[in-house]
Amino acid sequence: MKILIFVTNFYPYLGGLENYVLELSKRLIKKGIRVDILAYNIYKIKEFERYEGINIYRIPCFNILKGVYSLPQLNIKTKEILKKLSKNDYDFVITQTRFFSSSWLGMLFAKKNKIRLIHTEHGNVFVKHKNKLIQFFSWLYDMSIGKRIFKNAWKVIGISKACCDFAKKRGAKNVFLVYNCVNLNLFKKQRPKSDLRKKLKIKNKFVITFTGRLIYAKGVQDLIKASEGIKNIKLLIIGEGPYKEYLKRIAKKKNIDASFLGQKSQEEIVDILNRSDIFINPSFSEGLPTSVLEAGAVGLPIIATAVGGTGEIIKNYKTGILVNPKDITQLRKKILELMQNKDLRKRLSKEVQKEVRKRFNWDDNIKRFIEILQK
C-alpha cells in the first residue's frame, strides 16, 4: 500500500497537527505501508528530504496574513513535483483539516489522478479570528471549498467525536472516529533532565505551562490576563506564532512573570512539563488538543476550555477542570483553586494520566486507522 499525505506544514516544524502526521506516518511505515508527504516549503529549505523513513516533498508557497496562512505557488516547480508524484500509483491521498489550502490541493490531485481521497478533520467549528473580515472569508471558504472537500472524500476520519459531528453537518459521508493520540513512550512522568528552574530563576514559584501556536484563537492572552494579581506564579509559554510579540507586551504591561521559550523539541517539552505544576489550555476552539494529551500523559493537572473535543479528554473535576472560553474571571478562580489544593492536584494528575494512556494511545488507534483503509 502507498499513501500520499498533503499537509501545509511539516518537519522540521512540529506543532500539534504536524506531530500527529509524523506519528501516524511512522506507525504506518512499521506496518509495511509506504508514506510520502507533500508539504509547503514555508521555511525555504530542501525540496526533498527523507526523514524517519518518510519521503518529504516541499513545494513553493506564499505566506499571507502575517504568516498565519499559506497558499501554494502554482509555478513550474510545483507542477514538476506534482507530475512526478502522479506517477507513483498511490492507493490513497490523505488530507488534513479542510480549511488548509493543502487539503484543497490534495483533493484536486486525487480527483485528477483517480485516487481515493481520505480526509482527516481536526476542527469542529468555523474558523475564529479577531479580524471579522478574515473570519467572514474563512466562513466563505468553509461553505464552498471546505464543503466540497468533505463531499469529495471517499472516507472522512475525525480525530474526536466533535470533529466527526462537524464533518457530517458539512455533508461528509462515511465518517469514522480515530482519536488523536500521544506517544506514550516519550510523554510520561520522569525525573527532569535539565536545570530549568534554576536557569529561569523560578525557585519555589508555582509553574503554569502552555504549549501551542501563538495565535489569537489559542487564547494565551486570556491566560496572561487571568494571572494578573496572583502572587508567586511563573508562566512558561512554549511555541511560536504571529501573536508572540503582542502577548509579550501584555505580560509586561500587567507585570506577569512569563517566559516565552519559543519552539521546543518534543524531548524538551517533556522535560518542561515534568518541571511544571499545572497545564492550561485556554483555546477558543479545538479538535482534540495534542497539548492536553501530552500534559495528561505526563500526569499534569489540567485546566482547559470546554471547546470541541477537549471534553472527551477532560471530565470536569474527574480528569481535569473545564472552564468557559474567554471567561477570564472563571479561569483565575480555577488557577487559585488548584494552587491552594494539593490533594486535588494529585487526584487529577493520577486520573488524567490513566485516561490518556487507556484511550489515546497509538497502538490501539493505528489498528483502527488501517482497518478503515482496508474496508
Image (tube, rainbow, N blue to C red):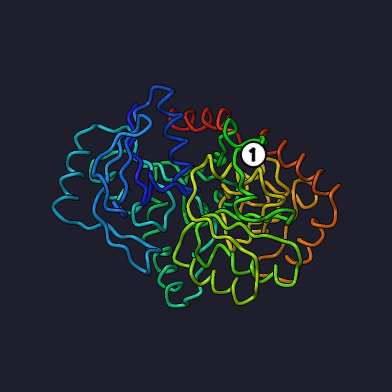
Reply above or below: 336 against 199. Answer: below
Quarter of the image holding residue 145?
A: bottom left
Residue 40 image position (x, y, % from top left): 30, 51
Look at 15% across and 45% down and name the residue there: 80
Percent coordinates x, y for residue 50 in the rendering:
30, 34
Question: Looking at the image, which residue is at 37% across and 64% down?
Answer: 67
Question: Quick check: 71 left or right of 137?
Answer: left
Q: Nearer the viewer, residue 154 or 27?
A: 27
* Image quarter (top left, top right, bottom left or bottom right) of the C terminus: top left
For this rendering, which residue is in front, 71 or 148? 71
Position in image of residue 92 (x %, y %): 34, 36
Q: Which residue is mark 1?
A: 192
Q: Secondary structure at mark 1?
A: loop
- Tell whether 167 sits left or right of 352: left
**Along the line of sight, which residue is nearer the eye, 348 or 225?**
225
Q: Is residue 350 above or below residue 233?
A: above
Q: Residue at x 75, y 54 (%)?
A: 204
Choose top left, top right, bottom left or bottom right for residue 146.
Answer: bottom left
